[in-house]
Image: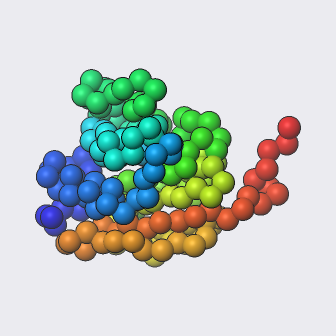
Amino acid sequence: MTSHPVVLDTVHVPARRALDLLVLDRVRIQAWDRILFVECGDGWIAEEASRRALRAYVCGLDTSLDQVERARQLREVRGKLEFMPWDGRTLPVRDAEFNRVVAILAGALPQQGAGLLRDVRRVLRGGGEAYLLHPTTGQAELRVTLAQAGWTDVCELARSDDDGAILLRAQCAPPSPSDQKIV
C-alpha cells in the first residue's frame, strides 16, 4: 500500500485495488444479496463482489461520467451487475432496495454528509449494513455525522496498511417517526 491519501481519482490503480480488496475481504457478501457500491470508480470492486456472490445483484454508482461509462463497457451484465451516475447527494435508487451499501468516502464528508448517510439508510433493507471506507484523518467527524444521521452499532473493521484509511461497518437504528413517509 502506498501513502496516497484516499482521494480515489488520484490514487494509482494498484493502491486503489489494495483498498478495494481491504473492503471486499471484510464485507459480508452472500448469494441473493443486493449490494450497492457508492463511488465504485471503474467498477472493479463491484465486479469482484459479483464474482464472490453468485446470484447477487450488484450496482455501482460514481459521480464521474467517464468512470461510469468505462465500468459499463468493461464490466456491465444487465440484471446482475449495473452502473449508474449519481449527483453526489441523492442515491438514484429505490427505498429499501439493498442489503448492503459500500460507500467509498474519498475525503471529508461534505456539509450535507448527514443527509447522504440518511439516504444510505433509506436504500437499505431492514437489517442491512453499511460499510464506509474513509480517510483516518476525518474519523472523529465521520462518527459524529453517523450519529446525527441515526446510525448505531458503528465498529471499525480494518485499517489500510499505511493507516491512511479506515473501514467502518454501521447498522442503522430503526427509523424514527420523522423518517416515516406519510402515504
Q: Residue at x 50, y 45 (%)?
A: 33
Q: Residue at x 62, y 62 (%)?
A: 172
Residue 156 vertical placement versus 53 (above, below) = below
* Residue 66: percent from left, percent from top: 29, 29
Is residue 89 in view from this perspective? no
The answer to whether 9 appears left or right of 142 in the picture is left
Which corner quadrant of the image does residue 72 belong to?
Answer: top left
* Residue 14: percent from left, percent from top: 14, 52
Is residue 104 in view from this perspective? yes
Residue 13 vertical placement versus 163 (above, below) = above
Question: Number of numbered discs present?
Answer: 0
Which corner quadrant of the image does residue 70 belong to?
Answer: top left
The answer to whether 34 appears left or right of 77 in the picture is right
* Residue 154: percent from left, percent from top: 52, 72
Question: Front-most of 158 and 84?
Answer: 158
Which corner quadrant of the image does residue 127 belong to?
Answer: bottom right
Q: Residue at x 19, y 72 (%)?
A: 162
Classify the position of the N terminus by image quarter. bottom left
> Which color scheme is applied?
rainbow
Q: Residue at x 75, y 53 (%)?
A: 179
The answer to whether 111 appears left or right of 67 in the picture is right
* Residue 183: percent from left, percent from top: 86, 37
The answer to whether 157 appears left or right of 6 in the picture is right
Question: Front-most of 159 and 54?
Answer: 54
